[in-house]
Image (cartoon, grey):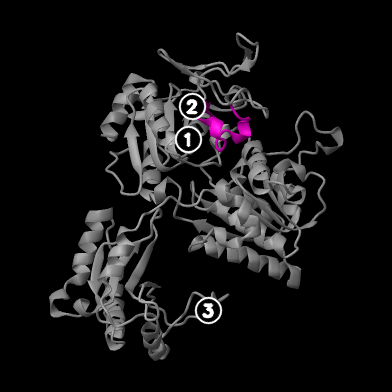
Amino acid sequence: MTVFRRTAESLLSPAERRFTQVLAEQMKMRDGISVSPSEVRSWERSLPVLAQDLVEAGLGEVEMLIEYRLPLTSKRADVVLAGTDRRTGGDAYVVVELKQWSRAEVWDEDERTRLFTQSTRGEFVDYLRDRFAPSPGRTAADHFLSSEVRPSKQLLKHAAKEIRDRDQFVLLDEQRLAYQIVLHAVDKARRQDLKTVVVITGGPGSGKSVIALSLLGALSGRGLSVLHATGSKSFTQTMRRHVAKGSTRTKALFTYFNNFMEADRNGLDVLICDEAHRIRKVSANRYTAARLRTGRPQVDELIDAARVPVFLLDGQQNVRPGEMGTLEQIRGHAESKGLRVQHVSLDEQFRCGGSRKYEDWVLMLLGLHESPAREWTGDDGFSVSLAESPREMEALLRSHHDQGRGARMTAGFCWRWSSPAAGAPGGEMSLVPDVRIGDWARPWNVKGDRSVGDAPPSELWATAPGGFGQVGCVYTAQGFEYDWNGVILRRDLVYRNGRLVTRRAESHDPALKPSTVTDEEADALIRNTYKVLLTRGMVGTLIYSVDAETQAFLSRLVR
């Protein structure tokens, strides 16, 4: 996880005059990162100064782990100092971020964070002496670099404690910034009667729902009126089941986008709109009372409902016609009302083992990136494999499932989806194995909100133990994560004439059938569907295509 390791003393030795060149070469070889001249200059100016401060503090043998990549994310720490704790004799570590700033101030100071400047350099040296003993740091560095790395805490496993115990999740960088911007906007709204719309964008697993739950816990703890809303029955029902277990009051915090048609204007302090890419054009449907079928956009209803409406979204997860949750559309509606919009981009991602490289590879594979599809060259943090058959895929996933790891199999919506049928001999209802490939067949996940045999209701397919054994569709997989992810491509997405093309006629998704959905819209929705399916895994993904030409193409990319 680190590309350069030296003691403070050795970094200052004449033998390390070329350390910036070596560091840049190692980053290029290890992660494919081309370092800019400005970053090299930053190293030259700041790293020797830090090493000199350590030497002056009598800590020349403290180890400097430079450009350390945080596990399960592509974020990097400038330097992690590893040494011996002055008080206990155990391992001690300090993370140092080096900035070439002319001015700085602390905002919402954290007890665990200190800011030192050139004018307080003496305080920094004293701080280091207080943390470390003047002894070698190599053992602490070895322990740190060889310690086990586990996947980030899954949202639903720890969400129940998140409402009561804010320490369950640690927000990093842009996540923390987004969280604090919302809290700041809430304070401003109450003090100055100023309404602000906050939009938080990010790819799969970038921490959007972690931020949403952190805000829900903090704001409800302050006694503010706050609700969490989504457009997904699976996601909301799972929140109610896992987060609000045993608490009627907490269950009431989780609702749906279409519940605000008659909401009072600014009746809430905060409305947290999670999975906001699921926002629809209007909330009304055929069951809505005639007096409410006004054609009012759903996004306007959500904006109007709270002093601080917060939208968390991924612009490439729109998978149904009529979904319109994008930054541009939300910004346009807010600005037409004369409202201020603050946007935070979570430009790193934490699902997919923290592999930004994998997410970019998926986008290029699906034609959602300007660069063409290319070979998967590997990443220490994430595994990608091509299965030879659905049977092999299931066996590999089952091996992980049997070891207690989360594992699920999904597919494009290209088979019929039958209702449960009565089975022999007792007449109990059972799922129909609609997903058939040769002599292998498995059922889709349950359609409704009641279990069928050992198979859980649709909203619990991704999280309940009985979910393994059914094939999930995009509507039950979206918004969830599991360790190992298997994805079956059918003939709605095939390789022809040098690229992946979509075939709308091969899809069984009823949402793509209406003539009001254009071919261009259908193409985008199919590609977005596979983008969602391919990015559910935290540790690894297995892929298999039913189409021989497509499977051969994938075999050239995933060797």
In the rendered view, tell whether residue 143 sits above or below residue 133: above
Residue 494, position as x, y percentages in the image: 39, 25
Quarter holding residue 495: top left
Three-letter code, disc 1: Leu
**What residue appears at the point 36 percent right and 73 percent down from the top-left corner?**
90
Residue hosting label 3: 106
Mark 2 or 3 closer to N-term? 3
Residue furthest left in the image: 15
Indicate whether residue 235 is drawn in magenta.
no
Q: Which labelled disc corresponds to residue 412?
A: 2
Give whichever of 299, 476 is nearer the camera: 476
Whether residues under marks 1 and 2 lie with C-beta atoms below 8 angstroms apart, the answer is yes
Residue 219 is situated, as x and y percent measured from the top left of the image, at 69, 62
Horizontal side, residue 133 vs residue 13: left or right: right
Three-letter code for the amino acid on which mark 3 is drawn: Val
Decide: is 256 above or below 113. above
Q: Which residue is mark 1?
A: 533
Amino acid found under the numbered disc labelled 2: Gly
Please provide the residue range marked out in magenta: 455-474
Label 3 Cα crowd, 10 Å radius (few <14 / some 14-19 / many 20+):
few
Mark 2 lies on a secondary structure that is loop
| Quadrant housing the C terminus | top left
Frontmost residue, 390 versus 248: 248
